[in-house]
Image: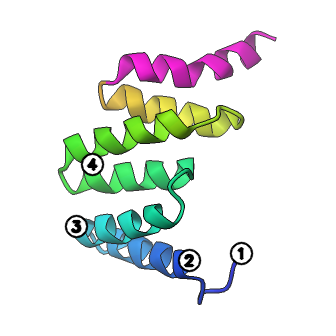
Amino acid sequence: MPPASDPLVALLQRADAAQRAGRHAKAVEAFAAAHTLAPRDVALGLALANAHTLAGEAEAAIRVLRDTAAHDDRSDLARSYALGAALLAAGEAALAVEAFEPVARARAN
């Protein structure tokens, strides 16, 4: 893990602390700032979408999930499954199917 002085790590620590304290708007701010540093990180996109959901910002969560789905290369099956589950929960069934497809193909083999 990078040192805590790393700006991304510091933002993630701040986001995690805010989320644990129930300060969801602050968590969104910190996750969003971290997301600008690593915009193609699927796990970070999922965390930001979750923070939006907890903050009662469903539309923002859906926007983040759509963007995350567009950048997922589907190379990590666990990550693709998590993205598919989040998309399905957000009502984005067509995008969820795309995310689940490599998982289903791997399971069929």
Name the residue tied to disc 4. 53
Mark 2: which secondary structure? helix
Q: Which label is found at residue 1?
A: 1
Relative to 69, residue 29 above or below? below
Q: What residue do we see at 55% from left, 47% from top?
A: 42
**Type of the residue with mark 4:** Thr
- How far separated are the C-alphas under marks 4 and 2? 22 Å
Q: Residue 99: within the magenta? A: yes
Residue carrying label 2: 9
Earlier residue among tags 4 and 3: 3
Q: Quadrant of residue 73?
A: top right
Q: Is residue 8 above or below residue 65?
A: below
| SS category of the residue bearing label 4 | helix
First reached walking from the N terminus: tag 4 or tag 2: 2
| Residue furthest bottom as drawn | 5
Q: Main secondary structure of the magenta part?
A: helix
Q: CA distance from mark 1 to mark 2?
A: 9 Å
| x 27%, y 48%: residue | 53
Residue 77 percent location from the top left of the image? 68, 33
Disc 1 or 3, which lies upstream in sequence? 1
Residues in magenta, as a range: 92-109
Identity of the residue drawn at 54% across and 61% down: 38
Q: Which residue is mark 3?
A: 25
Say which of 44 and 109 sits in front: 44
